[in-house]
Image (cartoon, rainbow, N blue to C red):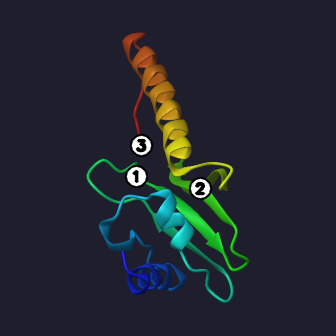
Amino acid sequence: MSEAAIRQGSQRVAEGKGSSVGGTKLSDALVRALPALEKGYTKTYDAGPDRIRGFGVRLTSSGARSFILNCTVAGIERTMTIGAYPTWSVAAARERLELEFEGIDKAAAEEESSGADFTPE
């Protein structure tokens, strides 16, 4: 992926439009290559057919990179931080989310089978 495409995606976030940087799945190489803006921060989201919706990386103007998950809880949008890069790799952050989702899915299935009123958002 070209630096121009990465910059364009990052700029879209700075303008409040979000970014999935050219439909590319997040990788350690992509996270390392993301350029910081002069001020503020950018968010770049995972893309592709097997993406985890809301999974991305936040890059601050100081160059700090953190993996995030944007989600809605009780109708309020939240951004949860998973961990900092390079302490966490893309694969480790993705695996952590998959384990969390697996736990949520099991709890929902147990509630549903017990006859409790369960309505996913």
Residue at numbered disc 3: 121
Q: Are marks 3 and 2 in contact (CB under 8 Å)?
A: no
Judged from this view, the residue extending furthest toward the left is 49
Q: Position of residue 68 (x, y in %)?
A: 58, 55
Residue type, mark 3 in image: Glu
- Name above or below for residue 87 compared with residue 108: below
Instruction: Report the disc number at residue 67.
Output: 2
Position in image of residue 40 (x %, y %): 67, 81
Q: Residues within 10 Å of mark 3 (few under 14, many from 20)?
A: few
What label does residue 53 carry, if any?
1
Crowd around label 1: few <14 · some 14–19 · many ≥20 (10 Å): few
Distance between the alpha carbons at the discs numbered 3 and 2: 23 Å
Q: Position of residue 1 (x, y in %)?
A: 36, 74
Looking at the image, residue 93 lies above or below residue 22:
above
Q: Residue at x 69, y 74 (%)?
A: 63
- Label 1: state its secondary structure: loop
Q: Nearer the viewer, mark 1 or mark 2?
A: 2
Pick the front one: 104 or 33: 33
Sequence order check: which comes first, mark 3 or mark 1?
A: 1
* Residue 34 appears in the rendering: yes
- Give x and y (percent) for residue 38: 66, 89
Q: Point out the tag, 1 or 2, that comes first from the N-terminus.
A: 1
Instruction: Tell which of 29 and 80 is nearer to you.
Output: 29
- 96 displayed left or right of 83: left
Nearer the camera: disc 3 or disc 1 = 1
Among all residues in the image, which is located at the extreme top?
114
Which amino acid, mark 2? Phe
Amino acid on which disc 1 is placed: Arg
Element on which disc 3 rests? loop
| Quarter of the figure with residue 23 | bottom left
**In this picture, is 110 found above or below 35?**
above
